[in-house]
Image (tube, rainbow, N blue to C red):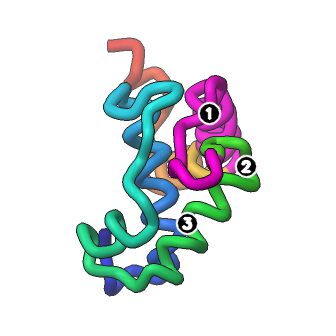
């Protein structure tokens, strides 16, 4: 987590959880720490953590079992993968293409 980043902390936290899902560190039906536990671990305000969890909840990445905690949704990995691919194709690829053109590079360099 980068406290000096332009990206809000709650989004960095949500992205970190998504990265852990993609890497297999967090699997379907795994329980994630409570808002207070995770906030204390990361050194952030519980309200910031709640915003992260709300975002993930609204996207269907996690779900809440009342009185028990938050869990990774059964189809979370597929949802995260689909969204990450979409963002990569919409944002990263055009930036990479523009940079390559600026540097006079051709896509053929990837065939080597």
Q: Could you tell me which residue is drawn at 44 percent across and 40 percent down?
A: 31
Mark 1 neighbour density, 10 Å: few (under 14) some (14–19) many (20 or more): many
In the image, 85 versus 98, the foreground residue is 85
In the image, 10 versus 46, the foreground residue is 46
Image position, residue 50 (x, y; %): 56, 72
Q: Is residue 59 left or right of residue 97?
A: right
Q: Is residue 97 above or below residue 45?
A: above
Q: Which mark is residue 73?
A: 1
Quadrant housing residue 95: bottom right
Q: Is residue 109 above or below residue 47?
A: above
Reading the chain from its start, which is encountered first: label 2 or label 3?
Answer: 3
Mark 1–mark 3 Cα distance, whole angstroms, equals 15 Å
Q: Could you tell me which residue is drawn at 48 percent across and 32 percent down?
A: 106
Residue 101 visible to the viewer: no
Q: Which secondary structure lies at badge 1? A: loop
| Quadrant occupied by the N terminus | bottom left
Mark 1–mark 2 Cα distance, whole angstroms, equals 10 Å
Image position, residue 32 (x, y; %): 42, 47
| Quadrant occupied by the C terminus | top left
Q: Which secondary structure lies at badge 3? A: helix
Quadrant housing residue 88: top right
Magenta-drawn segment: 64-90
Which label sits in the foreground, 1 or 3?
1
Reading the chain from its start, which is encountered first: label 1 or label 3?
Answer: 3
Mark 3 neighbour density, 10 Å: few (under 14) some (14–19) many (20 or more): many
Q: Where is mark 3, residue-wise?
A: 52
Q: Is residue 90 above or below residue 3?
A: above
Image position, residue 2 (x, y; %): 31, 75
Q: Where is mark 2, residue-wise?
A: 59
Q: Could you tell me which residue is drawn at 44 percent across and 27 percent down?
A: 27
């Amino acid at each position: 987590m980068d406290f000096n980043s332009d990206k809000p902390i709650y989004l960095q936290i949500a992205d970190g959880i998504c990265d852990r899902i993609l890497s297999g560190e967090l699997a379907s039906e795994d329980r994630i720490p409570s808002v207070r536990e995770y906030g204390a671990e990361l050194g952030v305000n519980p309200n910031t953590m709640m915003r992260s969890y709300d975002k993930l909840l609204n996207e269907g990445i996690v779900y809440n079992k009342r009185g028990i905690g938050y869990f990774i949704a059964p189809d979370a990995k597929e949802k995260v993968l689909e969204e990450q691919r979409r963002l990569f194709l919409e944002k990263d690829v055009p930036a990479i293409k523009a940079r390559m053109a600026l540097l006079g590079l051709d896509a053929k360099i990837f065939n080597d």
